[in-house]
Amino acid sequence: MSDPSVQTGFGCVWGIETQNLEVGFGILLPLDEDLMVTRDNEQAYNTVNGEVLAETFYRKQSVIRIRLYPGGSTMGNARSANQWQMEPGGELFLDDPDLAIWGWWVILELGKSRKFDSKAYWDLTLRRHGNNFVGGSNQRLSATVF
């Protein structure tokens, strides 16, 4: 009889496949990723009884929240990565085999967390609309931010 805690013939996706981000002389290593894809929507109501007749979806956007920690081959390189400056409105390329994540993103929020008994963390909130390109062109939407 097989061990009940071991299951064979079943696969699952494990871990994060987003590549490290090279910043300064160091890198930012991804720890957590949360992806949400949404669309704005409007309902059309029956004026007699208020029943929903239809719902229209438009303006697709994707938001990813990613937690990273700065590191490097030396302590100086790790510090360099932690001191790197990113600004909301800037853009960032995520290299990932998951096509829902791969590509250019606009930085919405950047947070850094440091504690006396733990490593430093970065929290990024990134967004893109559709595929993040202006329709019918090769220009990224994020490149139009002033």
Image (cartoon, helix red, strand yellow):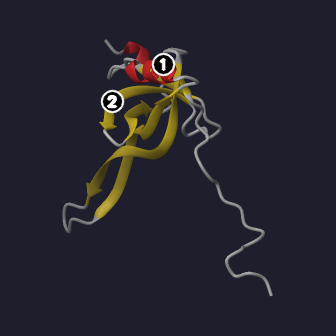
Q: Secondary structure at mark 2?
A: strand
Q: Residue at x 50, y 42 (%)?
A: 31
Query: Residue 82 occupies which quadrant of the picture?
Result: top left
Mark 2 lies on residue: 110
Please state the horizontal and vertical placement of residue 34, each as a whole percent of the image.
45, 46
- 52 vs 15: above or below: below
Instruction: Tell me residue 21's x, y (percent).
Output: 53, 26
Query: Of the residues shown, which amino acid type is indicated by label 2?
Result: Leu
Confirm or deny contact between disc 2 and disc 1 (CB under 8 A).
Answer: no
Q: Position of residue 124 (x, y in %)?
A: 38, 34
Mark 1 element type: helix
Q: Kindly report the distance in space between the C-alpha atoms of the residues bearing marks 2 and 1.
A: 22 Å
Q: Which mark is residue 76?
A: 1
Q: Where 121 falls versus 48 (above or below)?
A: above
In the image, 1 versus 58, the foreground residue is 1
Around disc 2, counting alpha carbons within 10 Å, would you say few (fewer than 14), some (14 to 19), or many (20 or more)?
A: some
